Amino acid sequence: MDAQQFDRLAARAEALAERPGDGRPPRRILGLAGAPGAGKSTLAARLVARLGGLAALVPMDGFHLARAELERLGRAERKGAPDTFDAAGYTALLARLRTPAPGTTVYAPAFDRSLEEPIAGAIPVGPEVPLVVTEGNYLLHDEGGWAGVLPLLDEVWYLDLDDRRRVPRLVARHVRFGKDRAHAERWVHDSDEANARLVARGRDRAHLVVPMS
């Protein structure tokens, strides 16, 4: 992404972060959706850094079910599929973030890629923060508990990256966090790409499609 494109996106996010008034909700929420490896977490972090204290980052990945629970359910080899997250918990958190109780800090979970586990209460969102940026695969998904997510978001941007670039980056990310290359390639082919096809079905529901490079 070149500097001009990022500046345009940052300006759009900053407009969402304008202080509430005239019937606007106490806080706004911007979602970044897209297939695994599309660059969601990178762009979200850059936007929040640009906006400084006006924005906080709350990733959807904090709502991964724990490994032990995935194994109990027989879903560990499909980690990353829609039913391997706590969609209801994520939706409930978005509702709290959107209309926080006065003076209340809301705590959100994070996801530690080195442990491959969620970490509860790791992200504080203070009452003074006017914009939350959330990112994840299923913000535009319309099945089951995920259908409640989109109505809670003021905007959702779909990050669109060509598979010829996205897939190698995704494999490299798995390797960086501990998988051997053969395992990483199998995981991407068998799991991540099935999820990517599901994510792509929500593209037309986005407020903005962002070409990535």
Image (cartoon, rainbow, N blue to C red):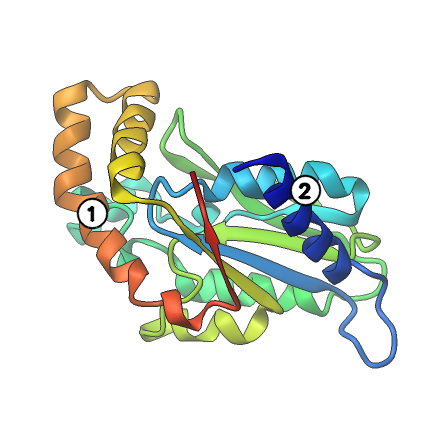
Res 51 → quadrant:
top right
* Residue under the image location 12 percent in, 22 percent down: 182
Q: Are marks 1 and 2 in contact (CB under 8 Å)?
A: no
Q: Secondary structure at mark 2?
A: helix
List x then y, in percent, for residue 130. 78, 57
* Residue under the image location 54 percent in, 45 percent down: 109
Q: Mark 1 to mark 2: distance in Å?
A: 28 Å
The amino acid beneath tag 2 is Val
Left/right placement of residue 205 relative to residue 200 reads right
Callout count? 2
Q: Secondary structure at mark 1?
A: helix
Residue 193 tag number? 1
Placement of 64 over or under 111, stated as above or below: below
Residue 116 tag number? none
Looking at the picture, tell me which residue is in the foreground, 5 or 121. 5
Left/right placement of residue 208 relative to residue 171 reads right
Placement of 46 over or under 177, stated as above or below: below
Looking at the picture, tell me which residue is in the foreground, 21 or 124. 21
The amino acid beneath tag 1 is Glu
Q: Where is mark 2, residue-wise?
A: 48
Whether residue 120 can be seen here = no
Res 180 → quadrant:
top left
Q: Earlier in the sequence, mark 1 or mark 2?
A: 2
